[in-house]
Image (cartoon, rainbow, N blue to C red):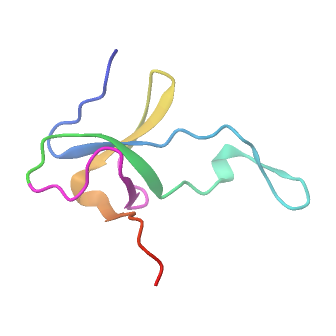
Amino acid sequence: MKELLPVNQHVVLDISETGAEQRTRSGIIIPDSAREKPKFAKLVWMSAIENAEVSPGDTVLFKSFSGTEVEFEGKKYLILPYADLLAKIVETEAI
């Protein structure tokens, strides 16, 4: 099995799409080039980063237009600098 192991304080996010085509309410199919890119993704791998606030398995929000998209073993990933992560999604109790 192969893995993408990022270096130099980078992280790898899984941005694989579900494959379902998107349509408007009237039934027009939205092509991939016109779809809005997701800004949330699951963190899969990360380089050795001291005092990291996230860990593999976390869902994170990242900067738009950041990183490099790669396809590896049939899945799409985004490799970006750790500094381009904006937030971590956490579950909280309702008040």
Position of residue 84 in the picture relative to residue 62 (left or right): left
Residue at position x 25%, y 55% in the image:
54
Residue 41 position in % (x across, y down): 44, 51
Residues in magenta, as a range: 51-67
65 in magenta: yes
Magenta-drawn stretch, dominant element (helix, strand or loop): loop
Q: Which residue is at the far top?
A: 1
10 in magenta: no
Residue 63 position in % (x across, y down): 38, 61
Q: Which residue is at the far bottom?
A: 95
Q: Which residue is at the far right?
A: 26
Residue 14 position in % (x across, y down): 44, 41
Residue 23 position in % (x across, y down): 80, 53
* Front-lying residue, 72 or 46: 46
Residue at position x 43%, y 74% in the image:
93
Numbered circles on residues, count? 0
Compared with residue 5, is residue 12 higher up or lower down, i.e. above or below? Answer: below
Q: Which quadrant of the structure image shows residue 84?
A: bottom left
Residue at position x 12%, y 41% in the image:
48
* Front-lying residue, 47 or 31: 47
Q: Which quadrant of the structure image shows residue 69?
A: top left
Compared with residue 71, is residue 52 higher up or lower down, i.e. above or below? Answer: below
Residue at position x 30%, y 44% in the image:
56
Q: Which quadrant of the structure image shows residue 44?
A: top left
* Front-lying residue, 16 or 69: 16
Compared with residue 11, is residue 36 higher up or lower down, i.e. above or below? Answer: below
Assign the N terminus to one quadrant of the image: top left
